[in-house]
Amino acid sequence: MYATRLIAAASLLASTCIAMAADAPPGASSCSGCHAAGPNGQTPVPPLQGRPASEIVSQMAAFKSGERKGTIMDRIAKGFSDEETRAIAAWYEQQK
Amino acid sequence: MRTNRRQFLKTASAAALLPMPAIAQGAGPKVVVIGGGFAGATAARFIKMGNNTINVTLVEANPTFTACPFSNGVIAGLRELKAQQFNYEQIEKAKVSLAFQQATEVDAQVRSVTLRNGTKLPYDRLVMAPGIDLRWDGLPGYTERDAETMPHAWKAGEQTLLLRSQLESMADGGTVIISAPANPFRCPPGPYERASLIAWYLKTKKPKSKVIILDAKDAFSKQRAFQSAWAQLYPDHLEWVSLSKGGKVTSVDPATKTLKTDFGEHKADVANIIPPQRAAAIAQIAGVADRTGWCPVDPVTFESKLVPNIHVVGDAGIMGGMPKSAFSANAQAKVCAAAVVDLLAGKTPVEPRLINTCYSLVAPDYGITVAGVYKPKDGLLADIEGAGGVSPLDAPRENRTLEAQFAEGWFRTITGEVFG
């Protein structure tokens, strides 16, 4: 009984892991080149994991319009439609 | 076509027509990754992370990885080579099998990779990230042995240290010459960052000296941003000679450190020859490189356009608008990993978006960038119009300082993701 539960928990973990890496919307996997996804390589560039989607969406919009000045995000934000940005933001909100 | 092949394999294995050792052993599919640099190590890790039932083997000849980005800082004495070096311990902990061997053969028919020690690794899908080879037939007079006299330093390691020690032992008043190749080559802004940091070193330590770039091109990456910074920082220490001004080096004489161009001869005290390049030899052996020497790939899955079930990522590939950079290699590898996981599960990969960001240091506290966002178009990765571009010329000086700080942060982040 205990063993069965353990196996169930393990496979649940495994499938969560699959969802994390494979179901990322287009563009999302590139972000971690600068926004560290794990405890390694943290920098002043803020992590995106677990951040409210609305916050990511509004910051991307501000970069895109020029309202928020950036060194590089202003140039990158212009490459994504609002819909693409929303999908990326929603996905990051779910990541831990 | 892909669906047909999958359906065929499914039917075949169900009817036990083909030997399928992986399935017979009750194990998952097999993926082999050749090359443990930014592209290959990322791909191996993310395929395993994407589906831990896949058996992933990373094949890499060298147990220590020496990163090229920031190695120009080592040449200029700003950092030590150790800061560039990483091992594969964490990748092994992530349950990726490691084979510290050179891959010598790829048999795309039976789908197997042969290693130097004779081991054969069967695969369902192969990811090739072999990087570049320097073309020793690319510049008359320059052979592999001559790199001991006139280093290329285009693969980080001993060569990086050699160029640094030559600069350190050069007398003040000397001339450093960098020969920059025609496109395409690894790290398009690299020769200009190197010239910048060498100029910084000379200005600081040997102010009567000078660095000259002899270029086989009339235009280069981040050109206006570099040139604007050079005019400000190094008016007496750095000179760029373009192709049309006679910059193309046509032959070299290592004995006298002389570089010949169509317009004349240049005698160097320190000569850094960056020769023409192509995808590494194993790509030619596997048949994934075309006549250009580079590997054409599908921009959605990074599967070779020449050989099925082999994917190519990183510097070896023809990636359309994406430059041969570590950031690109890492971004491509993550997209490729997701595609490989999908394909092995019988799913169709979605159309990706990719980003590239390249930092260059013009001085220790002066950074510039080029960025791009890419999507598949006409079989290549094309720039999304209106996005990306180079750090603006009129940006305030504090942005240059910030970009230099972000450059270091980027290096920590990306090496943390790949090797940490």
Image (cartoon, rainbow, N blue to C red):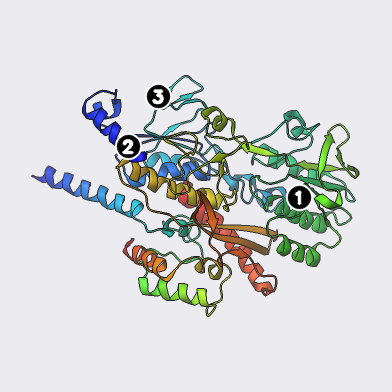
Q: Are marks 2 and 1 in contact (CB under 8 Å)?
A: no
Residue B324 visible in the picture: yes
Q: Residue type at mark 3?
A: Val
Query: Observer-nearest residue: B133 or B381?
Result: B381
Q: Closer to us: mark 2 or mark 3?
A: 2
Upstream in sequence: badge 1 or badge 3: 3
Answer above or below: position of B123 versus B228. above
Say which chain tag 1 marks.
B
Label 1 SS: loop
Upstream in sequence: badge 2 or badge 3: 2
Say which chain tag 2 marks.
B
Label 3 SS: loop
Q: Is residue B58 left or right of residue B394?
A: left
> In 3D space, how far apart are the residues under numbered discs 2 and 3 (Cα atoms)?
18 Å
Q: Residue type at mark 1?
A: Lys
Q: Measured from the top left, where is residue B224 in percent x and y?
A: 73, 63
Q: Which residue is mark 3?
A: B110
Q: Which residue is mark 1?
A: B217
Same chain, marks 2 and 1?
Answer: yes
Say which chain tag 3 marks.
B
In the rendered image, the residue lying farthest to the left is A1
Q: Which residue is mark 2?
A: B4
Q: Residue visible at 41% across and 58% down?
A: A26
Q: Closer to us: mark 2 or mark 1?
A: 2
Same chain, marks 2 and 3?
Answer: yes
Residue B420 visible in the picture: no
